[in-house]
């Protein structure tokens, strides 16, 4: 049986998962592809640590250079993360004619053009299914299953950490801080959770999906990013009363001649499937002109789901190798010469409905002042909630707007925040009705 | 630009959708595949009918033989349905070395072995993504994205007609007959709806999925099939009170050394995603050892969603043609020599929880008689509902069981049905807790 040699760089969680899956499913994989997908190397600086998996003699090495240089290696799996060494190794592997599989969304989102250009030049395959939404086959679906569709929008719960935290606050009524601590204790959040909770990780994934969905290049800086650290239990409770769940949503939409690309907390109506996706689970909705709405739900992170996506790419590449072809499907979904420049709509120009919570002094005329400012900015109010408070001190006013332009909302809110009747800290959360069926 | 020639046989709804999509997305498709996917023929006996699409001179023909014989044709798309002529044409196309795309689940479920054997012999590709769940990429996902997973189960709402009817009964409180009539008027059900409402269509799809998921051959006759025509509004209302929605579920499960394969109405707990999939929408849950639960939702029928799946197969095959390869992925997910015989578990041996509704005379001792028979058969009762009825005459008793063996339930129910205190027509609906996350 033909042998295909793979080398893994990075023996962390996902690396260990890939080793496990390749070992446990070796026979299963060969019964599907008709070749033996072998692990020749696993490179990691720490070769002492017990990861609970057994490797053959000589497989575990410290020298990553060997993986990208050994002429016998067909596929290099980059799982060290980070952007410097990973990029250097990946480019070297490509230059040496090796196919590459990676889960490194940050690197692809920031240096994608350079890496994809190199892969095209050296005619090697580059698999990155694991970089977005773990085991959900969104990359393959956009590149292959939806290939005849003009895609109108792709929205998703793309960060498991944020979804876990928001679900905890919702179900257990804890504060953000407590939910974050819980996520860290349970391995759902890093010690430094910034990348996740501030929305950057979701933005990296959105950049990759957006490029594939519309056949365009996109700069990470053009994506509006707002995280969940400002979400209070109070707002989640008001959202519930209004019939919404709060989710961190990554949204890209073809609107007119441009593309909206944004990540922010979003209130989702209960009857929308996104509202039922809880804990660390991910979900993606794609709207295409032929398929209408298509919805995927699955584990977006974790050792084995991510490993499954990595190995599916290795299998795909193996099948290309066995068919003596490469880049059978264009790396970025469209052929290089057909990748367009599409303008990204500035955040100020987007339209949405909004949830506002103002903390105000309990005095006559306050409601009329605030609603006056909103009305003068062309923002209609669809519902207002101001309940009689038993306690002394400032009181909340909760409002839901009709469709309004972001710039108008920003201006009106800035205006309201200057008033002495408010605490200067209005809460604004966008409402997403049209993100899934 | 290289030209790939396709011919469609059958200019019905899906055929028209494929023509539309190939015409409207011609440029989009060529910008993805780097070749021109051309429609050389559309064959149909009725060439007079206006389908609202324009074909070039000479494309529309009556002679299907020409499509399968013309040496210039690369891909034959079979969309006439039925099992006799479709099979003949498909086999002839394959013998002539043409790749085939079809949506004909009935034919694949009944004559799959013969057709796949021919495709293997002549080394042509056979695309059938459209045969199961319309635009949901379940075939590609099982064959490629989940290729490293041992699949534990695949369950799905695979028939849009049934889901539409059950949703109507639930949301509008109509009878089954009225909901069916409504479905027929709105184009969601055929004039003769037997194939759909009796569960056979879902069974055809389940046969295809089961073969792919476990790498096995399965006879249609080995699948237990029970349709929805016996579902009364009353049971849907009781289900709601108990926290369930009734769905027609197709279930295949690897249990021990065997495979369970069955289609029947199933009560789904509210918090399960299947419970939120309404109208004619389809959904599929796959459990794999590495990915855990993966859930897909999308349109399972209709002109454009089905056309999207057909064209995605045409694109896949075109990419193989352009890469000078075929059967890059085994037709049936596993390589021929690795397809196993796995026994199908007899329905009598399955375990499930059950919902029972007995119609009984209002007399002391009835409840104890019925629960006595169930208890003696090893069926534990988890909840009982018998509300005081104002009217005279028979009264309902609703029960929910703990896990029980189908054979024991059948025997106990047959026993209860012979009692003079009941109307002899106990309603039994299986409860599916473990069908999705």
Image: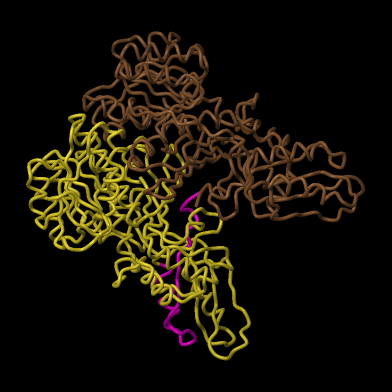
Chain colours: A brown, B yellow
Locate the N terminus of chain B and report the quarter of the image it occupies: top left
Q: Nearer the viewer, residue A43 or B416?
A: A43
Residue A86 shows in the view: yes
The answer to whether residue B245 is above or below residue A428 is below
Give residue B405's quadrant in the image. Answer: bottom left
Find residue B400 and report its horizontal and vertical position in percent: 53, 67
Q: Nearer the viewer, residue B350 or A313?
A: A313
Residue at the farthest right position: A392
Give residue A89's quadrant in the image. Answer: top left
> Which stretch appears magenta?
B408-437
The answer to whether residue B249 is above or below residue B136 is below
Q: Nearer the viewer, residue A304 or A263?
A: A263
Find residue A337 and report its horizontal and vertical position in percent: 33, 25
Residue A172 shows in the view: no
Find residue A184 and report its horizontal and vertical position in percent: 65, 30
In the rendered structure, the answer to whether residue A107 lies left or right of residue B302 reads: right
Count of numbered labels shown in the rendering: 0
Q: Is residue B137 magenta?
A: no
Q: Which residue is rendered at x = 74% and y = 39% of the image?
A: A413
Residue at the farthest bottom position: B392
In the rendered structure, the answer to whether residue B389 lies left or right of residue A7 reads: right
Q: Which residue is rendered at x = 71% and y = 37% of the image?
A: A411
The answer to whether residue B55 is above or below residue A282 is below
Find residue A112 and report its horizontal and vertical position in percent: 44, 21
Give residue B408's quadrant in the image. Answer: bottom left
């Amino acid at each position: 049986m033909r042998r295909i040699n793979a080398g893994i760089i990075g023996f962390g969680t996902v690396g260990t998962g890939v080793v496990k899956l390749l070992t446990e499913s070796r026979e299963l994989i060969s019964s599907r592809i008709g070749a033996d997908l072998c692990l020749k190397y696993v490179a990691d600086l720490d070769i002492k640590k017990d990861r609970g998996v057994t490797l053959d003699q000589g497989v575990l090495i410290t020298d990553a250079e060997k993986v990208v240089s050994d002429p016998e290696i067909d596929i290099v799996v980059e799982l060290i993360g980070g952007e410097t060494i990973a990029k250097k190794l990946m480019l070297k592997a490509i230059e040496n004619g090796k196919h590459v599989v990676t889960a490194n969304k940050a690197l692809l989102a920031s240096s994608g053009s350079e890496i994809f250009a190199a892969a095209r030049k050296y005619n090697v395959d580059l698999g990155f299914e694991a970089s977005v939404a773990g085991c959900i086959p969104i990359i393959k679906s956009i590149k292959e299953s939806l290939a005849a569709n003009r895609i109108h929008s792709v929205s998703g719960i793309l960060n498991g950490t944020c979804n876990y935290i928001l679900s905890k606050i919702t179900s257990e009524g804890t504060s953000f801080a407590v939910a974050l601590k819980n996520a860290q204790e349970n391995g759902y959040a890093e010690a430094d959770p910034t990348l996740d909770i501030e929305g950057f990780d979701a933005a990296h994934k959105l950049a990759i999906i957006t490029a594939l969905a519309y056949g365009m290049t996109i700069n990470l800086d053009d994506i509006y990013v707002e995280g969940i650290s400002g979400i209070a239990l109070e707002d989640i409770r008001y959202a519930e009363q209004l019939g919404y769940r709060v989710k961190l949503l990554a949204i890209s939409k073809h609107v007119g001649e441009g593309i909206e690309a944004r990540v922010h907390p979003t209130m989702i109506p209960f009857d929308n499937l996104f509202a039922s996706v809880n804990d660390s689970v991910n979900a993606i909705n794609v709207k295409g002109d032929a398929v209408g709405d298509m919805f995927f739900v699955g584990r977006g992170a974790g050792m084995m789901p991510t490993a499954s996506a990595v190995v599916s790419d290795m299998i795909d590449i193996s099948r290309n190798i066995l068919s003596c072809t490469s880049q059978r499907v264009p790396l970025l979904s469209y052929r290089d010469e057909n990748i367009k420049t599409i303008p990204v709509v500035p955040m100020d120009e987007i339209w949405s409905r909004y949830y506002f919570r103002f903390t105000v002094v309990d005095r006559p005329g306050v409601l009329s002042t605030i609603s006056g400012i909103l009305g003068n900015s062309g923002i209609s109010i669809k519902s207002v909630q101001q309940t009689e408070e038993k306690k002394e001190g400032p009181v909340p006013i909760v409002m839901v707007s009709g469709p309004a332009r972001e710039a108008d909302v920003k201006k009106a809110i800035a205006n309201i925040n200057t008033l002495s009747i408010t605490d200067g800290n209005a809460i604004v959360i966008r409402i997403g009705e049209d993100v899934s069926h």
